[in-house]
Image (tube, rainbow, N blue to C red):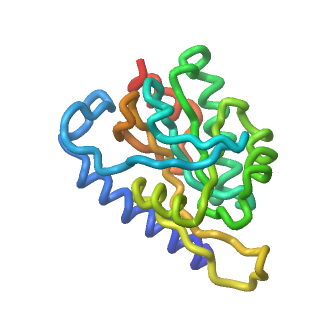
Amino acid sequence: MSPRLLILILVAFAIGAVVAVSVQPPMQSGVVRTGKALIGGPFTLTNQKGERVSDTDFRGKYMLVVFGYTYCPDICPAELQLISSALDKLGTSADKVAPIFITIDPQRDTVEQIRQYIANFSPRIVGLTGTEEEIRAAASAYRVYYTKADGPASADSYLMDHSTFIYLMNEQGEYVTHFPYGVTPEKLAEGIAKAAG
Ligand SMILES: [Cu+2]
């Protein structure tokens, strides 16, 4: 296992532990009805059509939020594929869900780049980019870790390390639960259906 991967996994576990500790009471139905949501928050970013969108534009839908970047060689494509097939499994219930991909690499992920990338997956997915500051604010609201990876890289060729959770937020934009990278499409669809009923 590469040191980079090991660090990512350790970070993922650390964040998972924080999430587990901070969410109370324990989720029975998968839906947190009381307690403060410590994950998530306001964001205003630009979608793949070049439109400005905010978290409040998704009220009434279950946001399925994932952070990543289009140049990601492995994890992000797999994760978006996973989300796409979970949405397929949900059938018409998928209409209640707003799958949202937020880049953590705004330097390369322009609106056009995001548009082309998202087209490889479900047309339901909203791809968001923004300024460095806007992305940093969104990522920190979701407790998402990201950084440029060490290693040989030129100005436009580099890897990003980032956490890989898929967050499910309810119709009011509040944290419901999250899914780890590696969850099956069946489990993901099941988790969404349980919350969004
Ligand atoms: Cu990735």
Q: Nearer the viewer, residue 116 or 76?
A: 116
Residue 73 can be seen in this image: no
Residue at coordinates 42% horizontally, 61% vertically from top-left?
140
Up the image or down, 142 lies above or below 171; here it is: below
Q: Nearer the viewer, residue 108 or 96?
A: 108
Q: Nearer the viewer, residue 155 or 80?
A: 155
Residue 11 pos. (x, y %): 44, 68
Up the image or down, 130 lies above or below 42; here it is: below
Left or right of 108: which side holds 177? Answer: left
Residue 161 pos. (x, y %): 59, 69
Residue at coordinates 59% horizontally, 34% vertically from top-left?
185
Residue 94 pos. (x, y %): 57, 22
Q: Quadrant of residue 10?
A: bottom left
Which quadrant contains ligand 1?
bottom right
- Most extreme residue toward the bottom, as rendered? 152
Up the image or down, 24 lies above or below 31; here it is: below
Residue at coordinates 63% horizontally, 83% vertically from top-left?
150
Question: Which quarter of the rendering shows the N terminus?
Answer: bottom right
Residue 113 can be seen in this image: yes
Residue 6 pos. (x, y %): 53, 72
Left or right of 42: which side holds 106? Answer: right
- Most extreme residue toward the top, as rendered? 92
Q: Quadrant of residue 92?
A: top right
Question: Which quarter of the rendering shows the C terminus?
Answer: top left
Residue at coordinates 72% horizontally, 40% vertically from top-left?
49
Q: Nearer the viewer, residue 88 or 173?
A: 173
What is the count of numbered marks? 0
